[in-house]
Image (spheres, helix red, strand yellow):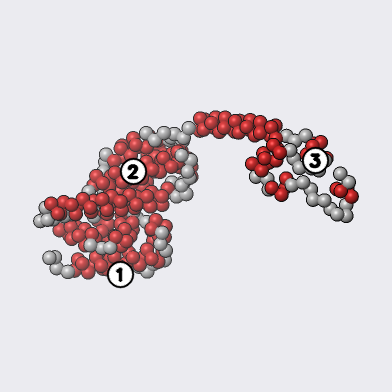
Amino acid sequence: MSAPLPPELAALERALEATRAPLPAGLRARVLAASAAVPLRPRARSTAWFAAAAAIAAAALLNLSNSLALPSSEAGEAGGAPRAGCARALLWMGAPAACLDPPVANPGDDRWNSR
Amino acid sequence: MADAQDLEAIAAGDAAAVAALYGALAPRLFAFARRLLPVQADAEECVQEVFVSLVERSRRGEPVQDAGAYLFASLRHAVGARARRGERLAALHARAAPAEEPRIEGPGPEARALARALQALPQEQREVVALKVDGELTFAEIGVVLGVGLNTAASRYRYALEKLRKALEEPAP
């Protein structure tokens, strides 16, 4: 809250208020016309666009995942490294290189050394 | 001040909502712009520009929290840019015709003296005077528009009035 103005400054404030410019009559029509010319947001079109983009992205991902699918017998059960082509693809997808190394044999574990 | 429903109506293309917002804010916005710009057409263009900018923003789906604060802040920038352009043009004209006096509009000698004294104020003080007197904003609202604290806005206004009073007491050159 600011302190009230002394009388001489309050009089000056009133003098300023008395010289306030009036709103020109023609401005309203110009502003309303310019506002009416602004295009509406194309909701329907943008929704359709996003739906199409999502469908394309989903199809691309599905295609990619199909091409990268590892047969479980090769990738998991044997415990070996993925095939070279798949390894490249996994690296391309951002998998750390260490994840693709063959398992390190545990000296005390015959399950690894027996192969 | 416009609430969220008004802005949604504007976004949906409701011309009546734009007209209502114009009716509520345009007189104060125009008075503010006109106080700071010497040419009426420039003030009109600035007001039109900020209203259209608000409508465009609403229709792009970019929410505005407070239409009044947005309009005054945008108008302040628009007026500042227009004033700088006008000053550059005036400087060019002054070089071409140095004897020409700047034209200050007003109904009488007191109003002209007041306008001249106001023009002599620093820009930041002139803005605060225009926002308070013509924009009819509170110091808190002025603080939001200018990005300063309430006390800074209030003290700038008081300093500005003091300077105006001193300038008006001095004999005219």
Q: Residues within 10 Å of mark 1 (few under 14, many from 20)?
A: few
Identify the residue at horizontal 73%, vertical 34% (top origin). A69
* CA gap, disc 1 and disc 3: 87 Å
Query: Which residue is labeled 1 in the image?
Result: A6
* CA gap, disc 2 and disc 3: 65 Å
* Marker disc for residue B143: none
Position of B79 compared to A109: left or right? left
Dot 1 or dot 3, earlier in sequence:
1
Q: Nearer the viewer, mark 2 or mark 3?
A: 3
Please indicate, yes or no, whether residue A62 appears anywhere in the rendered image.
Answer: no
Please indicate, yes or no, whether residue B109 appears anywhere in the rendered image.
Answer: yes
Q: Nearer the viewer, residue B48 or B168?
A: B48
Query: Which residue is labeled 2 in the image?
Result: B49
Position of A69 compared to A23: left or right? right
On what subunit does the disc labeled 3 rest? A
Label 3: state its secondary structure: helix
Return the x and y of residue B79 as percentages of the image width and height.
30, 51
Count of numbered circles in the view: 3
Q: Are marks 1 and 2 in contact (CB under 8 Å)?
A: no
Return the x and y of residue B53 as percentages of the image width and height.
38, 43
Discs 1 and 2 share one subunit = no
Q: Nearer the viewer, residue A104 or B119?
A: A104
Q: Nearer the viewer, residue A17 or B39?
A: B39
* CA gap, disc 1 and disc 2: 38 Å
